[in-house]
Image: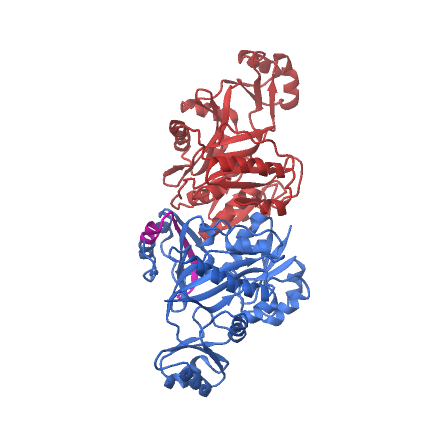
Chain colours: A red, B blue
């Protein structure tokens, strides 16, 4: 029986394990946060990394559920057991500077940007990128996720303030992008280089947190899907990547795509695959890192993933709803926390959009769903 | 967070837990066999039942994954925590005499039968049921499953021999049934009496072990499904049943159904629901015993469940096959052992039957699939 070690013990690790059991695998977790929630296999709670050796001894291979891990830790693991994706992929993905530079190297278009290391440089960069006429987005080069470590700057005068709030460390300043929508593509690459792609999703974020993902998209040109596949394939090959990789993109009014960021892991915008695709992103990640053939990525239903944030809502009421699949992570309610998600499926778009509207009204604090297509 | 205790820690318990995690539940197992394999939650390995109290203290409610449990044990549990299904359901289902008598009481037709407690009585019963002209089937009243504790008697002269092999305890002798096929219906009843039914499956057994289940059936009259629903609903209500109940039936040439036996649990002939129905039997069992609304039982695909018996076969090869969902239980190969199953799905019957034929040839020792319908 294969044992996979997972760095991180949150909901993504839990859903990887749930998908891996039927493949005959078992899971061991190394939690460095002190707050594991996966609760589906032996868990080393080890903020200091002192139990690394014991963790490694129990597993055949290692993967991770989130990218904010010390690269040195992952390198050390690589010297002991196969680790997928690699420390190089991790290093690139956790640093917006390296990431953007890789995008450029591979001719993947991105918003214009500058890297800055002072309030002064931030002001100059903002000016250069048209701040004042258009806002610019400022992000920490490392560490930020779910909208944390980000700021929107509308005037060059705000440079000192923004530097005070999220600076004191390297920042990236990005030009305003007049995008029509946010989309993502998820791809999987196996140990032998075989690659499969999921249909792209449209994602609705509020305050930097994903709220809705819809797939497959009715108003997506096949050429756009192909373009996104070309971009992510270049990344997979350059990084000799194994596992699930996610690329978030902006789509502009003329249809063109600009890469925003990538995540070296199963991704919230791919949760729809659990109930809408032949093989889920979780199962395919386990297949990939285990050297098993990859499963089909075809969507069999129209699906909308709805995140449950802060408060779960009335589970009794939700489970009365037809064609609704509930995925709770076993966490306590807390403002801003991802507690679970719903996958709502339908045979046609009209039904799906009507149902998403209905379900969103059952959820505490759910924003109004807004998509770029109509039924 | 609700904790469900499961008596038994094999693959059914494991699949219940896999379905229950996304509902926010966790699982604790009490194994009385000394050989737990579920491996997905705290497990008391407790052949003597001495840890019963500790097990009960950790859970909100109790269910079981197999019916060959001491009724006294389940009664004791009932005095401590809610147990679903009840000890009465268990008692009836583990005794073919009580079961047949309940069928009769509820006007559910069964093959003619006699209960016997000696070789002499066995010979007389066999004679009375036409043995010699037709074979009769002899089964132990308790304990038998997967073809164990069963014999086919072709002549009254064999009575002494059969009594020697499986007797020495009460036996049931059943008249030969000239059936066209074996079918089963699975129903779920919630805590408040609400009931849902899955589409019936056609089952192919070899040597008493299920090998293939297909659902939903293309050649099933709606009236037959309704008849089966009427029968199982009568059982559910009489037993004030909560959870999944399975009723296995023989269908005769004239279409009529004869009840064979029932199982007070999720059932191998319902594994197809994991990938072919909106809500799996496992999720619906957890919903039912937890007082949650029941999920839809509609089939969304044509599905064939293929058991992996004795040897798993080449997993690499199997996972290359499209529309194939693998479910391994994490057990070592052993002759006659259920190691896992495959759910093969298709949009039409022609494709499904062709694919089942192909896949069966990849499996070691798989019998030729034979169904009562053609594509």
Q: For this rendering, which residue is in front, A90 or B279? A: B279
A107 vs A50, left or right, is left
Residue B366 within the segment the image draws in magenta: no
Q: Judge whether residue B237 can be spotted in this image.
A: yes
- A211 up-or-down from B301: above or below: above
Q: What is the x, y in percent for residue A199?
A: 43, 35
The residue closer to the viewer here, B154 or A245, is B154
Q: Looking at the picture, tell me which residue is in the foreground, A209 or B300.
A: B300
Q: Is residue A19 left or right of residue A50?
A: left
- How many circles with numbers are drawn on the protein? 0
Image-quadrant location for residue A198: top left
The residue range painted magenta reads: B335-355
Q: Nearer the viewer, residue A108 or A356?
A: A356
Eyeballing the image, is B29 above or below A295? below
How far across and down, in percent of the image, does residue A21 sit?
48, 51
Within the magenta stretch, is there residue B347?
yes
Judged left or right of residue A287, residue A322 is: right
Across and down, in percent, residue A290 comes to 42, 46
Can residue A71 be seen from the camera position used here? no
Q: Where's residue B153, x and y in %?
A: 38, 79
Q: Quadrant of residue B5?
A: bottom right
């Amino acid at each position: 029986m294969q044992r996979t070690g997972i760095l991180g013990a949150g909901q993504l690790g839990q859903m990887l394990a749930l998908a891996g059991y039927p493949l005959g695998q078992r899971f061991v977790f190394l939690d460095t946060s002190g707050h594991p929630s996966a609760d589906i296999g032996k868990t080393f709670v080890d903020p200091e990394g002192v139990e690394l050796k014991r963790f490694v001894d129990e597993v055949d291979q290692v993967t991770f559920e989130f990218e904010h891990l010390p690269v040195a830790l992952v390198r050390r693991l690589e010297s002991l057991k196969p680790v997928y994706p690699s420390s190089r992929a991790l290093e690139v993905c956790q640093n917006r500077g390296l990431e953007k530079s890789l995008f450029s190297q591979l001719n993947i278009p991105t918003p214009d940007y500058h890297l800055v290391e002072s309030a002064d440089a931030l002001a100059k960069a903002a000016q250069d990128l048209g701040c004042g006429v258009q806002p610019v987005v400022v992000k920490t080069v490392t560490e930020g996720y779910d909208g944390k470590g980000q700021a929107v700057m509308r005037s060059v005068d705000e440079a000192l303030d923004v530097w005070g709030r999220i600076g004191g460390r390297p920042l990236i300043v990005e030009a305003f992008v007049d995008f029509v929508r946010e989309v993502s593509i998820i791809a999987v690459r196996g140990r032998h280089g075989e690659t499969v792609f999921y249909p792209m999703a449209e994602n609705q974020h509020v305050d930097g947190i994903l709220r809705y993902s819809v797939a497959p998209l009715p108003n997506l040109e096949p050429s756009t899907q192909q373009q996104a596949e070309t971009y992510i394939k270049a990344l997979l090959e350059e990084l000799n990547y194994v596992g699930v990789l996610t690329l978030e993109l902006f789509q502009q009014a003329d249809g063109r795509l600009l890469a925003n960021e990538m995540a070296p892991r199963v991704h919230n915008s791919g949760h729809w695959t659990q109930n809408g695709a032949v093989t889920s992103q979780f199962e395919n990640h386990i297949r990939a890192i285990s050297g098993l053939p990859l499963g089909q990525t075809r969507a069999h239903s129209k699906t909308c993933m709805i995140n449950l944030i802060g408060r779960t809502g009335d589970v009794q009421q939700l489970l009365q709803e037809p064609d609704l699949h509930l995925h709770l992570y076993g966490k306590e309610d807390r403002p801003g926390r991802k507690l679970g998600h719903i996958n709502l499926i339908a045979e046609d778009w009209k039904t799906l959009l009507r149902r998403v509207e209905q379900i969103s009204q059952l959820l505490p604090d759910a924003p109004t769903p807004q998509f770029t297509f109509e039924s």
